Image: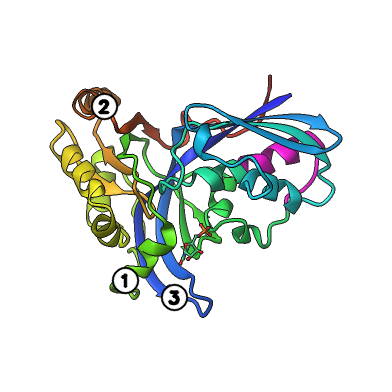
Amino acid sequence: MIEVFAPAKINLALHVTGRREDGYHLLDTLVAFAPVGDTLRLRPAPGLSLTVSGPEGAAVPAGPENLVLRAAAFVPGAGGAEIELIKRLPTASGIGGGSSDAAAMLRGLAHLRAVTVPAEGLERLGADVPMCLSPHPARVTGIGERIVPVTLPELPAVLVNPRVAVATPAVFRALSRRDGAPMPDLPVFARVSDCIDWLSAQRNDLEAPAVALAPEIGAVLGALRQTAGCRLARMSGSGATCFGLFATMAEAEAAADALRATHPGWWIASGALGDQAVRSAPKPV
Ligand code: C5P
């Protein structure tokens, strides 16, 4: 049996720069991954089967519509597998849970069966699947299929979800402008604070429409901004999960504890965004 980690994807900035003829939006986004995520356990088997467990498992369908099973069907010659998905990330929450699970499935199958994952068309599984396949900091354009790896400092972060599910298409529909400026070229950051200062000058264009649809997101951003040491608070993806960035992990962990005490109903996690703690390689168990 092997185990594959499916980390949360955080959009540090997300600019909507246009729209394709098929209605999908063109994005310019900077992503990094968190050491918080779902786990997939895979055992070779004659057919494909899926069971879902974990604290967030109840909201996830285990039928053929599950992205993990659709990802398995995407790889020619992958054969069967007994799949256990341990769900820790809230669903429909802007941190790529389903896409990251699908990408972890693809990494797992490549490892288990020595098959090659087709490079083309992965975005049809979900716009975030290509960027989750190799979960390292990247600048991503198109609808999510053009990926350029970047170097960022490890960013101490708190992730907060107010437990409202936000439908991505509704947020895109509520956008008032679809022609935002792309991000400027990424400088080389000597320090965490330089990176946070640069990010502060960028934006998530989906934040205002998402807050209008789900005011709880505004409450999360307000609470993060009032937490000691928070240097930047922003929503990820189409929400509702928001992140706060801090200078140190000690500050981020203290902020997470403080928010857990004042908002026991919120989903709250902390960790450094970046490569150090995000173990994406499948490992035998
Ligand atoms: O591909 P995914 O399932 O993540 O996208 C959900 C929906 O969000 C799409 O059907 C589309 O309405 C909207 N979307 C978009 N532009 C993107 C990504 C998603 O309009 N770049």
Q: Please, which residue is most extreme toward the top here? A: 285
Amino acid identity at mark 2:
Pro
Disc 1 + disc 2, Cβ < 8 Å: no
- Marks 1, 2: nearer the viewer: 2
Amino acid identity at mark 1:
Ala
Please name the residue shown 30% across and 57% down the image.
210
Please name the residue shown 73% across and 50% down the image.
117
Q: Which residue is mark 1?
A: 181
Query: Which residues lie in the magenta part?
Result: 103-117
Q: If you read the primary sequence from the N terminus, does the residue marked by circle 1 or circle 2 appear first?
A: 1
- Kindly tell me whether residue 163 is visible in this rendering: yes
**In this rendering, position of residue 129 left or right of residue 192:** right
On whether ligand 1 comes within 8 Å of the CB at mark 3, the answer is yes
Which quadrant would residue 284 be assigned to in this image? Answer: top right
Which residue is more in the foreground, 97 or 233? Answer: 97
Q: Residues within 10 Å of mark 3 (few under 14, many from 20)?
A: some
- Kindly tell me whether residue 203 is visible in this rendering: no
Q: Which residue is mark 3?
A: 19
Please name the residue shown 21% across and 45% down the image.
221
Q: If you read the primary sequence from the N terminus, does the residue marked by circle 1 or circle 3 appear first?
A: 3
Which residue is more in the foreground, 6 or 229? Answer: 6
Quadrant of the drawing holding the C terminus? top right
Please name the residue shown 38% across and 52% down the image.
166
Q: If you read the primary sequence from the N terminus, does the residue marked by circle 3 or circle 2 appear first?
A: 3
Percent of width and height locating residue 118:
73, 55
Percent of width and height locating residue 190:
30, 42
Q: Is 104 one of the magenta-colored residues?
A: yes
Percent of width and height locating residue 99:
55, 48
Q: Which mark identifies residue 264?
A: 2
Cα separation, mark 1 vs mark 3, equals 13 Å
